[in-house]
Image (cartoon, rainbow, N blue to C red):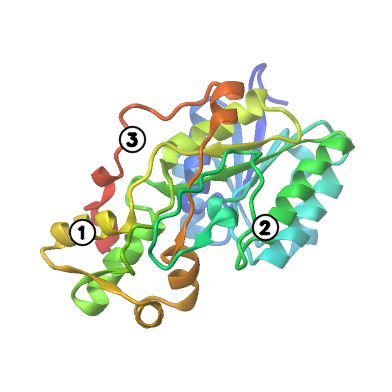
Amino acid sequence: MTPEGTANVLVFGAGGYLGSAIVRRFVAAGHQVTGLVRREDAADQLRAVGAEPVLGDLGDIEAVLPLLDAADTVVFAAQLMMEAERTTVSAMIDRLAGTGKAFVFTSGTGVLSQRTDGEWSEDTFAEDDDFVPSKYIGRRKDTEDLVRAASATGLRAMVIRPAMIWGHGGCPMLSAFHASAEKTGTVCYVGRGLNLYSGVHVDDVAELYALAVEKGTPGALYHAVSGETNFRTLAEAVARSRGVQSRSVDFAEAITIWDKFTALVALSVCSRSRAPRSRSELGWAPHPDRLDIMEDVAHPAYRS
């Protein structure tokens, strides 16, 4: 049992960039938080912020499922390959069916991204707008739909679909730009670099999870987004921070600088989103001091 007004919160992916921010947010609110992690150093980090770690691996789902029984709220913020993700999430939903507990699944706006090879797209999507799922990772929408449909089984199942997450030196796209400088001596972007992912600070994403658990609608999808800056502008800012030049590369060279997945799914697409449902239904809004991704460009974590 927990004190009145608090809950037992179980976070999968608790040692990750987003998962750790979610843990901090729920701990700060006075909840009892348990996090599944794979390494002892990650377990130490959870203990340091007041959470209880459990060492384990989602690859052994039968060993993990009993953890759900003691939780009031389950947050899935782990990163798995898509088929394994769907299988794992399906097993969790089956375990939780009929309990009335909250289950929040983490997706991402990569599902609605469009390959543009560096060009801008005027398309921008709110939570329930129709779109053509990404050829590359659009299958995650099948898992989103699975979770949302689970609300019919007596589960407060919801999906959060964040934009590109940044803050505290953890943005994957900024990491990629810095990595290109380490490898080539210049900061590279694809094509004209007019493409982008809309962005949001990691702490504002964590706040959305708390609001969804508090008052979200079963079956709902919520976006988290606070602004957008094209990739060429970000690459040029990274270059200035490192005292080097920036330059355009084509897709073939991009694969040699990064890898095919990063070049294709992260840096060659345009993914623009809006969050009207999060704002109107949950009262979510990004903090006014966390709106400018440029403040994160030169964070020392990107060089470590």
SS for callout 3:
loop
Q: Is residue 279 above or below residue 103?
A: above
- Horizontal side of 167 relative to 78 (left or right) equals left
Q: Which label's residue is closer to the chain start, 2 or 1?
A: 2
The residue carrying mark 2 is 140
Q: Does the rendering let one see residue 26?
A: no
**Quarter of the rendering containing residue 69:** top right
Say which amino acid is labelled 1.
Glu
Task: Give the Cα separation between the discs numbered 2 and 3.
Answer: 28 Å
Report x, y in % for residue 249.
Answer: 30, 75
- Residue beneath the point at 47% across and 77% down: 260
Q: Nearer the viewer, residue 185 or 272?
A: 272
SS for callout 2:
helix
Task: Give the Cα separation between the discs numbered 3 and 1.
Answer: 19 Å
Report x, y in % for residue 302.
Answer: 28, 59
- Residue beneath the point at 51% across and 44% down: 124
Residue found at the very far top of the displayed protein: 4
The residue carrying mark 1 is 236
Q: Which label's residue is closer to the chain start, 2 or 3?
A: 2
Say which amino acid is labelled 3.
Leu
Of discs 3 and 1, which sits in the foreground?
1
Say which amino acid is labelled 2.
Arg
Task: Give the Cα separation between the discs numbered 2 and 1.
Answer: 32 Å
- Residue beneath the point at 27% across and 55% down: 234
Q: Does the rendering let one see residue 160?
A: yes
Q: Which mark is residue 291?
A: 3
Graded by Cα atoms within 10 Å as few (under 14), some (14 to 19) or many (20 or more), the crowding at tag 1 reads many
- Horizontal side of 150 relative to 107 (left or right) equals right
